[in-house]
Amino acid sequence: MSRYTNPEIITDIQNGKEEVLFYVSRKFFQPSRRWLRRKGVPDDKTPLIFVTVLLQLFRDIQQQRLSIHVDFESYLFNSLEEYFKQEKAKNRKQRYMLGPIYSDKQKDAVSMCVEIQDEEIRKLLYSRYAEKLSFEQIAVRFDFSNPVIAQFEVNKAMSRLEGIVRIRLNIEQN
């Protein structure tokens, strides 16, 4: 594998030489993969993201006649950063628009788990999550001495419910 200088990389990309593509792939794939993994991208998705960004980068260099004095490595990692931010924003927007999607079976299982709780816990959870009462209001309604105790009781009831739901849905705890 021959070694390319930064101006040679840019020039060869502009001239459409394929050898530079192999060189850049070999040289920058592992550092890019490590960077993506640190950002939380699953390992099996890193090759696709790297290839997508690299091809877009090559197209941009060929079409825009980029200066040969641009640092290719910085340009590559800035492109990865930009791609990552765009995908993250797109995922956030889709999640906001769609919300979590649960099957009817999952909904039924959760409602059954709520039903098996005693009446006091159901009322406590209902007042916090359905009525959206503050801990101060819950403390007054349920006769707790202060909001901290109300928060503790709500969290305890919710933890218990989560445990039951996990068991019911066969979800392993992390």
Image (spheres, grey):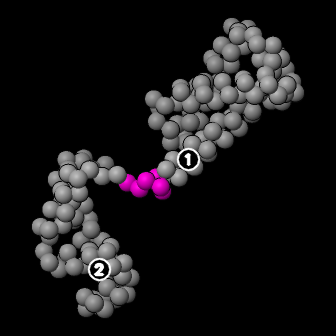
Q: Position of residue 66 (x, y in %)?
A: 84, 27
In percent of the image, x 30 and y 52: which residue is there?
102
Name the element at disc 1.
helix
Q: Please say if 87 is above or below 47.
A: below
Q: What stretch is highlighted in magenta?
A: 95-100
- Residue 30 as seen in the image, left or right of residue 172: right
> Which quarter of the figure has residue 161?
bottom left
- Look at discs 1 and 2 and give the one toward the viewer: 1
Q: Where is residue 83 in the image (x, y as percent from the top left)?
A: 63, 39
> Residue 136: where, in percent of width, then height?
37, 87
- The amino acid on which the numbered mark 1 sits, given as a three-letter code, is Lys
- Quadrant of the snapshot with the N terminus: top right
Q: Which of the labelled discs sits on residue 90, or is there none?
A: 1
Q: Which amino acid does label 2 sit on?
A: Ser
* Horizontal side of residue 38 vs 42, given as left or right: right
- Residue, x 17% and y 80% (percent of image)? 120
| Magenta-span inclusion, residue 83 | no
Q: Residue 127 carries which label?
A: 2
The residue shown at (50%, 38%) is 41
